[in-house]
Amino acid sequence: MSGAEPLRQPDACPWAAARRLLPGTREAFARGWEGAAAAERAVSSLLGQAAELLYRSPESCVGPARAVRLLQLGDGLCDYTWEKLNTGPWRAVGRGWRQAYAYGCLLRALGLCAGGGESEGAEEKAARAALRACDLGLLLGAPVLDNVLGRMADVLREHLPRPRAAAAEEPAQKKTRQDAPLVPAVKTEAAIPRLRCPSLEHFRDNYLSPQRPLILEGVVDHWPCMRKWSVDYLHQVAGSRTVPVELGCRYTDEEWTQSLMTVDDFIRQYIKNEFQTQTGYLAQHQLFDQIPELKEDIGIPDYCCLGKEDEDDIAINAWFGPAGTISPLHQDPQQNFLVQVMGQKYIRLYSPEQSEKLYPYEGHILHNTSQVDVEDPDLVKFPKFKATAFQACVLSPGQVLFIPASYWHYVRAMNTSFSVSFWWS
Ligand SMILES: O=C(O)CCC(=O)C(=O)O
């Protein structure tokens, strides 16, 4: 046997590792799609054919024909459900259709892994494409088979080369984009008060109940993200993951759009590329569900226990982008703790009593957003804005801004920045 290639361990290849995550029996595989099958006969027919392929033959028998067939079935299912996912408001899309889409992504991922490739390069390429299929299923589908897509994403990441850490952390942004104006001085009378670790009662009686903004200090210093997170770290942990990003200066601009890209591409194009003139914002509601490794680095601010809902109902959002990303002046219905992890943000707050002077857009979609460009207002068009009182701050790492429910907030990143916000009631 000398000189012979060592035998591969069963899950040394992505296919074996991915296949291992499926339920042991065809019946258990079928149980996961009750919701999806209920959606339409065509779905159950495609899934039935997939089960036949996956459970009919021994695990070790991976033929190119099977890979092609799995891909066809996955594509068929994704294409069929895509239309349903994109018809009407997202809230109205039935869970069955989202489950069916998740199954489609699962089959695609399995097909890509089964196809593998002869060379290491081909295998890596297939694993990357399979990881993308898992991410799409995680983002747009509903969980199936005990979060099989999340578990498969973890396994696939292990089959990708670990990005090497940079020798020393590069300055996240070599220069501030020219279109990012300098930070206006925050006048003392407009400054948001700051407190270091106030008691729960003090916070409740003086800020939460009267709905007054506050900057909390010293309350998240122990969260691992405060010492671990950097552009380099995000590249290592999440680089190969596909996430939704917002492209354009602000979501009210005509040319603003959304796209899907890997975190690596986002970092290369928008964080480290000093010649990029457009801003990109990884503003994501699902990032921490999609990448649990990042969630382990954060906690929930203790003060959220003053709310009425369970911790599981708190919405956690990620905001990662270069200097110059702007969230236009808008209001949200819930209380918000905006935790600054990396970089600094210039923030202005206007109380809900001022709404009339802020000229919200008319109509349903943008009614919570002001038409006024806060740092360069058109006072001819929006004359009342001039007399509107506001509070402001530059939020720095470790600080947590309490934004009361319905408070108007405008946010501009002054440099490469990562914030995490917690919406709670
Ligand atoms: O950080 C930002 O750009 C926006 C944050 C925000 O609007 C929020 O947390 O509600």
Image (cartoon, helix red, strand yellow):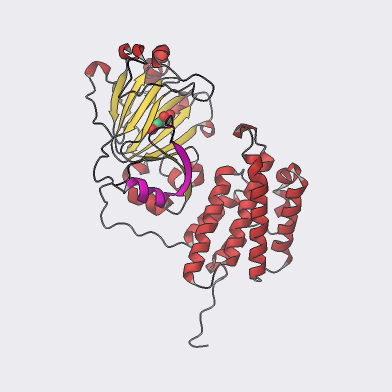
Please provide the residue range marked out in magenta. 249-271
Q: Is residue 28 visible?
A: no
The quadrant in which residue 276 appears is: top left
423 relative to 140 in the view: left or right? left
Task: Name the residue: 24% across, 46% down.
Answer: 174
In front of the other: 327 or 220: 327
Number of numbered tags placed on the structure image: 0
Query: What is the residue that sits farthest to the right in this orientation?
Result: 41
In front of the other: 58 or 278: 278
In front of the other: 409 or 69: 69
Task: Name the residue: 41% across, 60% down.
Answer: 162
The quadrant in which residue 378 appears is: top left
Task: Name the residue: 51% across, 43% down.
Answer: 289
Residue 163 in the image: x percent, y percent? Answer: 38, 59
Image quarter for ligand 1: top left
Q: Is residue 189 above or below residue 95?
A: above
319 relative to 20 in the view: left or right? left
Residue 132 in the image: x percent, y percent? Answer: 52, 53
Q: Is residue 338 above or below residue 416?
A: above
Q: Is residue 367 magenta?
A: no
Q: Is residue 360 visible?
A: yes
Residue 4 in the image: x percent, y percent? Answer: 51, 84
Task: Name the residue: 47% across, 22% down.
Answer: 368
353 relative to 375 in the view: left or right? right
Residue 425 in the image: x percent, y percent? Answer: 50, 24
Q: Is residue 263 magenta?
A: yes
403 relative to 184 in the view: left or right? right
